[in-house]
């Protein structure tokens, strides 16, 4: 009887410890965006699983990193591979937890500019011109670059006709197709995506073209935390959100080491000049 009592007590203590585990979540993005949506999903799913969640509504990535670095508690922050080039905080083995999904970038051209010899190409503020230079040189087009604060303002400029081409993320690019505003002429993956050709099939180059990877970083980048978040990504609500957004589910498809290698290659491509 004593052995059974001790065993039951051990189980209760283990469950109490597991359920009392505290995780602070930082969205690193404003409401309405994917960062905030992902953070909210983690909050709701992990609370359902019994975790104590502290949701710090910090929408600025730089401020989020400061909080993460200074906290003694486990903190997770929504992050992306283009952010190190913006805020000077690299993704490394010490803070990388997992990849949620990866998508290419696309060049999409307006219907009205299809026969133009000179194109106004819109880029977000931190994007270098090297990638577009190579593509449009091969296509025999002259290019004028215009800069925009983010993908939202770039898409608005494209919609208004201020630029002929936008080079941006999948969500903004697929809107062009859905709304019959133009055609996506190339993507940055090494294979055709949704009948959109790879830039590598057009340009003969060793350049690593940028893509988008939505990831989670932490001040406690442990295997245990990774497994907790991988389980959260299997929740029906998270799966439904990714499906609705039209992004693949890359969580857990590769090892931590393989994911980090891909992420590092992408973050370096954003830094190239």
Image: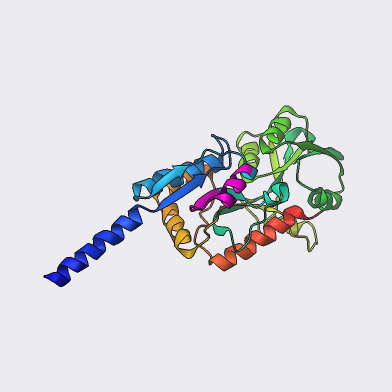
Quarter of the image where one finds residue 110: top right
Pinpoint residue 133: horizontal percent, then vertical percent.
84, 50
Instruction: Name the residue: 73% across, 31% down.
Output: 157
Image check: 190 left or right of 74?
A: right
Residue 30 can be seen, yes or no: yes
For the N terminus, the quadrant is: bottom left
User: Is 67 colored magenta in this rendering?
Assistant: yes
Image check: 143 left or right of 108?
A: right
Instruction: Name the residue: 57% across, 68% down.
Output: 257
Q: Nearer the viewer, residue 39 or 152?
A: 39
Pinpoint residue 198: horizontal percent, then vertical percent.
70, 55
Residue extending farthest to the left is 1
Instruction: Name the residue: 71% across, 35% down.
Output: 154
Height in image: 154 above or below 196? above
Pinpoint residue 258: horizontal percent, then vertical percent.
59, 67
Figure coloring: rainbow
Residue 242 can be seen, yes or no: no
Report the number of discs.
0
Range of residues picked out in magenta: 63-77
Pinpoint residue 251: horizontal percent, then vertical percent.
50, 57
Residue extending farthest to the bottom is 3
Image check: 17 left or right of 260?
A: left
Q: Nearer the viewer, residue 39 or 191?
A: 39
Residue extending farthest to the top is 160
Q: Nearer the viewer, residue 177 or 212?
A: 212
Instruction: Name the residue: 63% across, 53% down.
Output: 193
User: Is 84 colored magenta in this rendering?
Assistant: no
């Amino acid at each position: 009887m004593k052995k059974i009592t001790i065993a039951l007590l051990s189980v209760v203590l283990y469950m109490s410890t597991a359920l009392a585990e505290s995780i602070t979540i930082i969205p690193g993005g404003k409401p309405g965006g994917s960062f905030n949506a992902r953070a909210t999903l983690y909050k709701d799913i992990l609370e359902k699983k019994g975790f104590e969640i502290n949701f710090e509504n910090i929408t600025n990535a730089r401020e989020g990193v400061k909080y993460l670095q200074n906290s003694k508690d486990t903190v997770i922050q929504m992050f992306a591979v283009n952010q190190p080039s913006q805020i000077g905080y690299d993704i490394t083995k010490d803070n990388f937890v997992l990849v949620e999904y990866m998508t290419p970038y696309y060049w999409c051209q307006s219907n009205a500019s299809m026969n133009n010899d000179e194109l106004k190409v819109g880029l977000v503020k931190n994007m270098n011109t090297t990638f577009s230079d190579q593509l449009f040189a091969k296509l025999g087009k002259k290019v004028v670059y215009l800069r925009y604060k983010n993908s939202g303002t770039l898409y608005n400029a494209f919609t208004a006709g201020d630029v002929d081409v936008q080079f941006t993320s999948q969500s903004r690019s697929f809107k062009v197709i859905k709304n019959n505003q133009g055609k996506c002429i190339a993507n940055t993956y090494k294979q055709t995506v949704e009948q959109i050709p790879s830039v590598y099939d057009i340009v003969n180059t060793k350049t690593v073209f940028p893509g988008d990877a939505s990831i989670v970083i932490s001040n406690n980048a442990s295997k245990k935390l990774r497994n907790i978040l991988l389980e959260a990504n299997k929740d029906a609500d998270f799966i439904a959100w990714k499906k609705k957004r039209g992004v693949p589910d890359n969580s857990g498809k590769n090892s931590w080491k393989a994911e980090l290698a891909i992420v590092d290659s992408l973050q370096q491509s954003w830094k190239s000049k």
